Amino acid sequence: MTLSLGASGVLERWLTGPRFRPLPNRSPGTPPPLLSFEFFPPRTKALEAQLWTCIRRLEVLRPRFVSVTYGAGGATQERTHATVLRLVRESSLVPAAHLTCIGASRGEIEVIARRYWEAGVRHIVALRGDPPAGSRYQPHAEGFAFAADLVSGLRRVGDFEISVAAYPETHPEAPSPRTDLDNLKRKLDAGATRAITQYFFDTSVYLRFLDRCLAAGITAPIVPGIMPVSNYAQALRFSALCGASVPGWLGEMFEGTEDDPEIRRMVALVVAAEQVRLLQANGVDEFHFYTLNRPDLTYAIAHILGVRPEAPPRASGALLPEAAPAPEPSP
Ligand SMILES: Cc1cc2nc3c(=O)[nH]c(=O)nc-3n(C[C@H](O)[C@H](O)[C@H](O)COP(=O)(O)OP(=O)(O)OC[C@H]3O[C@@H](n4cnc5c(N)ncnc54)[C@H](O)[C@@H]3O)c2cc1C
């Protein structure tokens, strides 16, 4: 067979670009990455059942911890507490309770933290929190003003493991990237053990942020927060609120999939899998997943990262949940 470059020179064009190596395999014996999963507390019985299906599906992956969010404005205090306590009672998972400074005095927050400590909860995700939609953040007159103050307060209650938030693209209210980085350092210096990032889509943004953290003297893990996106329109709205930039290529990937949830889920998997593999190729071996209480994308990405269940799920005659059509997730 004779290869022809043809009039258009297609092959020539294909053969003159840069050459990339494939992403490296993990070397034999390297442990799979450490994962954590984030859930939100359910509003209704039906959503609670959905959350627990999600928890059971992901439990076999033995995440390092699972965290439960605290609604904007502190709206879900009781539901967060109930979900965390049910995790303690009914699962093998290590729960981390999100706690915010919003709408409560220092004394009230310390009471909540003590309740967690007494229930055996040893990990808190300490945040300033977001005020209810449409309002500006105002510290409570007798409260902790910022997350760094909350971290110090928690340290006085118990020897908690504490995670805090980090922003590779800078927190939207911060006067500058530098002051935001100083704030992250303050939170870690106050006693937090790791930071979990706001989600991002451009991997280089996160890697550059790690460089800046290191240069600022930060050595604690800055765990990437991974948001598997399967509802692009909602992800756009979310991202505008939290200051995560959405690269043009992401829109192009999802373009035309609006009425095709199955294809959208496949695209979502490819996008997130590519992101975590790139991070893994850069040496990152800890990941935090925003599950939105839907297990399948997270489970599949964990599988791609090399995380497998302890024992394969037992065949019970029933099909695995994968086969059941899942309701459409939010972002
Ligand atoms: C992993 C993760 C989980 C989250 N979970 C929740 C949740 O469960 N519930 C919820 O409501 N929100 C949650 N959020 C959102 C978070 O609460 C918001 O982004 C909030 O606006 C900032 O919280 P923070 O803890 O980062 O605040 P902080 O670290 O206190 O920073 C807030 C802002 O204030 C600035 N700042 C800090 N200290 C000072 C100071 N002394 N003087 C002046 N400026 C200062 C910072 O630069 C930043 O701009 C989460 C975010 C992440 C990344």
Image (cartoon, rainbow, N blue to C red):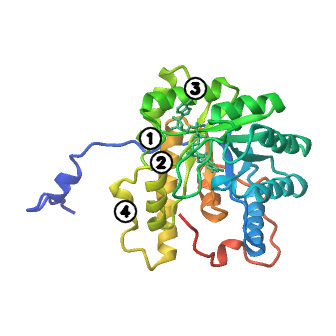
Indicate the amino acid at tag 4: Gly
Mark 1 and mark 3 lie on one chain; the one further toward the N terminus is: 1
Asked whether 241 or 53 is in front, the reply is 241
For label 2, count other residues whose C-alpha is less than 10 Å away and answer few (under 14), some (14-19) or many (20+). many
User: Is disc 4 placed on a helix, strand or loop?
Assistant: helix
Q: Residue at x 72, y 58 (%)?
A: 76
* Image coords of residue 329 (percent x, y): 58, 69
Q: How many marks?
A: 4
For label 1, count other residues whose C-alpha is less than 10 Å away and answer few (under 14), some (14-19) or many (20+). many
Mark 4 in CB contact with mark 1 (< 8 angstroms): no
User: Is disc 2 placed on a helix, strand or loop?
Assistant: loop
User: Looking at the figure, which quarter contains the N terminus?
Assistant: bottom left
Alpha carbons under labels 3 and 2: distance apart: 20 Å
Q: Which residue is mark 4?
A: 251
Q: Residue at x 83, y 74 (%)?
A: 316
Mark 2 in CB contact with mark 4 (< 8 angstroms): no
- Please tell me the numbered disc located at residue 169: 1
Farthest residue in the front direction? 141
Look at discs 3 and 4 and give the one toward the viewer: 3
Farthest residue in the left direction? 7
Q: Residue at x 50, y 76 (%)?
A: 261
Alpha carbons under labels 2 and 4: distance apart: 14 Å
Mark 2 in CB contact with mark 1 (< 8 angstroms): yes
Mark 1 in CB contact with mark 3 (< 8 angstroms): no
Residue at disc 4, CB closer than 8 Å to ligand 1 = no
State whether residue 104 appears in this view: yes
Does residue 45 appear to the left or right of 173 in the view shown?
right
Does residue 290 appear to the left or right of 312 in the view shown?
left
Mark 3 in CB contact with mark 4 (< 8 angstroms): no
Look at discs 3 and 2 and give the one toward the viewer: 3
Mark 4 and mark 1 lie on one chain; the one further toward the N terminus is: 1
